[in-house]
Image (spheres, rainbow, N blue to C red):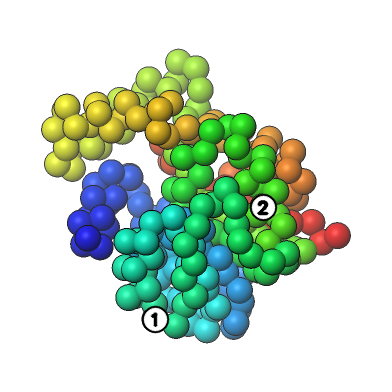
């Protein structure tokens, strides 16, 4: 399953590993830093964290027991917790960083403020939240982004029908927002330094920090 999933996502998300490296670039890694990989999947983000800082203290969190089983096999010393990112079951100020790779686009916009409050709660003061998400510019520009993504999918083994079926999940299964809306939600939740680090439509990496107080 790991092989199938990891291979599939490389053929689904343009510049996948560049996005992960950019995400991890935003984290001031240090020994025994406590990191929550929320929606960890098979552990791609955690693998990049541990490559750079082998002594990082990582908690892997995902709704799928199959994904956690794969991640657990990769990182035997990491804590693995099953659950929904809408309800993070961790004490206040548990982590120095919360990282999410392509997890929050399953949340409808009305669910995001509560999710962000949960992230802020489990972060220590000054801790960082970095995530990568599907995103669209909005308006007429969306059609160009959809066309470019469709071309990527078909160039990487999807039939035209499969590409169209995947892209039709937008608004039904995936609920992407514009970068501007992401930043507004982060600021509305009380995060500091909310910014878009990289935008490579149809994905973006965003970063914010919990206030020290």
* Residue 1 shown left or right of residue 131 in the figure: left
Determine the residue positioned at 47% across, 62% down. 82
Q: Secondary structure at mark 1?
A: loop
Pick the front one: 183 or 81: 81
Does residue 188 show up? Answer: yes
Q: What residue sits right under mark 2 in the picture?
A: 118
Q: Secondary structure at mark 2?
A: helix
Q: How far across and how far down the image is residue 58, in percent?
A: 52, 73
Q: Report the quarter where the C terminus lies.
A: bottom right
Determine the residue positioned at 64% across, 65% down. 90
Q: Report the quarter where the N terminus lies.
A: bottom left
Residue 172: image quadrant is top left
Q: Earlier in the sequence, mark 1 or mark 2?
A: 1
Determine the residue positioned at 52% across, 84% down. 55
Q: How far across and how far down the image is residue 211, in percent?
A: 79, 56
Q: Are marks 1 and 2 in contact (CB under 8 Å)?
A: no
Does residue 127 show up? Answer: no
Dot 2, how many residues are within 10 Å of its Cα: few (below 14), some (14-19), or many (20+)?
some
Q: What residue sits right under mark 1 in the picture?
A: 76
């Amino acid at each position: 399953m790991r092989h199938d999933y990891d291979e599939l996502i490389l053929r689904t998300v343009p510049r996948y590993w560049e996005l992960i490296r950019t995400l991890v670039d935003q984290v001031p890694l240090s020994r025994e830093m406590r990191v929550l990989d929320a929606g960890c999947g098979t552990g791609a983000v955690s693998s990049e964290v541990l490559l750079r800082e082998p002594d990082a203290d990582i908690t892997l969190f995902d709704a799928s027991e199959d994904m956690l089983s794969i991640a657990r096999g990769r990182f035997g010393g990491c804590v693995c917790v099953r659950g929904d990112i809408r309800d993070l079951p961790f004490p206040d100020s548990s982590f120095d960083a919360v990282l999410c790779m392509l997890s929050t686009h399953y949340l409808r916009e009305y669910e995001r403020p509560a999710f962000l409050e949960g992230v802020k709660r489990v972060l220590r003061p000054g801790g960082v939240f970095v995530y990568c998400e599907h995103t669209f510019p909005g308006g007429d520009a969306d059609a160009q982004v959809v066309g470019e993504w469709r071309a990527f999918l078909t160039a990487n083994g999807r039939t035209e029908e499969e590409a169209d079926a995947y892209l039709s999940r937008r608004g039904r299964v995936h609920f992407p927002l514009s970068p501007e809306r992401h930043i507004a939600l982060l600021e509305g939740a009380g995060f500091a330094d909310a910014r878009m680090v990289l935008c490579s439509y149809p994905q973006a990496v965003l970063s914010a920090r919990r206030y020290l107080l």
